[in-house]
Amino acid sequence: MIHRYDFGSPIHTGAVVRELPVSGGAIPYFMISREHDALCFSLSLDRDDIVFGLGEANRGINKRGHLYTSWNIDDGLHTESKNALYAAHNFLLIFSKTRCFGAFFDDPGLMHFDLGYTKIDEARIISENGDLTLYIIEEATPAEIVSSLRRLTGRSYLPPKWAFGYIQSRWGYRSEADVRAIVDEHRKRRIPLDGVCMDIDYMDDYMDFTVDPAGFENLSRFCGEMADSHAHLIPIIDAGVKEKKGYDVCDEGLEHGYFCTYEDGTPFVGAVWPGRSFFPDFLRDEVRAWFGSKYHRLLDAGVDGFWNDMNEPALFYSENGIKDAYEKAMRMKDMNVGIHEFFRLRAVFADMANNPNDYESFYQTLDGRRVRHDQVHNLYGAFMTRAAAEGMTAHNPDCRRLLFARSSYIGAHRYGGVWQGDNHSWWSHILLNLKMLPSLNMCGFLYNGADIGGFNGDTTEDLLLRWLQLGVFTPLMRNHSCQGTREQEIYRFSLQEKMRDIVTVRYALLPYLYSEFMKAALTDGCMFRPLAFDYPEDETACRVEDQVMLGGECMIAPVYQQNARGRYVYLPEDMLLIRFRAAGDYDCFPLQAGHHWIDLDLHEMPLFIRRGCVIPLSRGGEWVDAVDAKDLTLLGWIGADSAYAFYDDDGLSTQVSLADGLTRITVRCGEDDTSAHGGNLTLHTHKLITD
Ligand code: MIG
């Protein structure tokens, strides 16, 4: 049951796909107060209330006890105290034994979620705009609340199957030769690979939709060559459009007035990688159609995947900001600069990037109405994603393409996936990666992943190996790093064979992971869930922060501490531990419910299968298309009758249906043999554990 409450004149964010009538009567749960324009929703928190949600946000799966800010920002230092990241996913799920409800604050401006930070037993959610729609969702279980939210906000984006392959990326690949070498090194060493990301250096002078002729002589020929090697090219597209006469995107944007403008109507200028740049007003249909059509140039060359970056939008400085800074600095020039003036002077330059004043200085147009950017700030990335997705659909409506973005808002989950932004090569960021999985899933962002190995800072062999062991399960499995950091491709390390073996596990699990992803997408469910969703009566399970449920059958619990030779795991029920070393190399141990220490050498990774369940495992492959999803070995600790609903499809077409893709795999435990059936699948049962 969803109740809708409107406050002021809500901005039409496009987050919801179903128009609900406004509910009458008093608003449940929240006390509402107004301070100037801001609206505050307060909620008292019982001792046992858990607060889930907020999608791509910092800190725990249980968000209680801190302050979170919805203000999309390019900040590559995700320390524990950061309140805002790249996305605004304003959904909370309050859960305890006595109550369970969801609240989606559909407001694209600045919002604060004080979830027991100021006062430990009170949540205060503040909308600075004061214009918003609040949806309160009441269902019997957390999973049903999430499904209800998704029916309201629409079905999740479906990537092509190849997007579940291993992807290599790094800021710094600048030519065909660079990319070819990456692919060759992987193939030579039999490290599975499905794609290589092209970061900003492939562009000509950082101009979107151009290709540096010095590095990439002939993109379509090169796409063909890469396709022969079973590798997809995934170029980046940035939000800012370079100011340059003769550059079609700039010229057309100016001619038609497609860019965001200052109050006086002249185009807003901010600086990002291309230097002085304009920012397309993606909120307008015609601007999206135009910008989306620009993707066709690269699609025509054979590209079938993109990542959209810098779309918070990030601003290194603005035209006004830098003028202002110079003036301030000049004024201080002849002063006797004391320590306080020095800090002020330094801040003038340090605060130039992503400055709130700049976001208040330009305008966009939504539904024909001019709005100041800060009031709709959190929509910018979402609507860029939508532009790209609509452009790709226009290019070919029958083919799924890969698309993931940095900045997002609920609603963008219909158009693409996300990556978790500029993390660090820190052990704590393996855990942060894990914690975001269920939260992102709740908000509809099923296709997601973090930069494996860490983006900023220098990785270490053991960090990368352990991170890959989590990455095996994340839909986007991409190794990405920043220029200037230690080289991070698997083959740079002495442990490369162990790392390769872990990647082979991904391809062995691919039929299962794809099946669980698609079922989650097509039923508005979650592929990753907090343990509380599955074991709501189990107090211990409800508060676990370093293990998550995967699909209908599994639980994952990665190692995220350096030098650890294993970890403690809490099993809410009997489970079968699979300890993987490589695709065909693993052992199985039935374990009883309770706390366990699990030995896990550096090259070993755990997967837990619930007792009574069975999952399919392929023989693996060096790219997704090489994986035979019809020849499967069943893994599990089964009872008299176990079954698995296996989903598969061609991995590309947009017209998919759950019914058409499902094969029911059933297992029979006989006196002396165990047999399995499932349509035209070849099923091996020799790995099954029976009671
Ligand atoms: O200001 O394109 O998050 O993945 O490598 C940095 C260069 C811009 C930020 C992205 C990162 C990417 C980088 N970009």
Image (cartoon, helix red, strand yellow):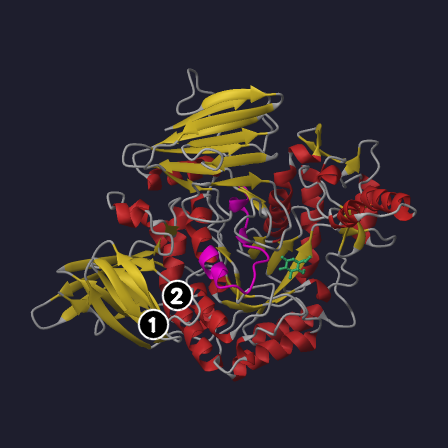
Q: Closer to the camera, 469 or 166?
A: 469
Which residue is depicted at the point 34% across and 72% down?
Answer: 600
Q: Are marks 1 and 2 in contact (CB under 8 Å)?
A: yes
Q: Name the residue under label 1.
A: 600
Q: In which quarter of the image is residue 150?
A: top left
Residue at numbered disc 2: 559
Residue that protrudes farthest toward the left in the picture: 671
> Which quadrant would residue 403 be assigned to in this image?
bottom right
> Magenta includes 85?
no
**Residue stretch in magenta:** 410-432
Query: Magenta span has 429?
Result: yes
User: Which three-letter amino acid code belongs to the residue tagged 1?
Assistant: Leu
The residues bearing labels 1 and 2 have C-alpha atoms spaced at a distance of 8 Å
Residue sitting nearer the eye, 485 or 247: 485
Q: What residue type is labelled 2?
A: Val
Residue 299 visible somewhere in the drawing: no
The image position of residue 579, as x and y in percent, is: 31, 71
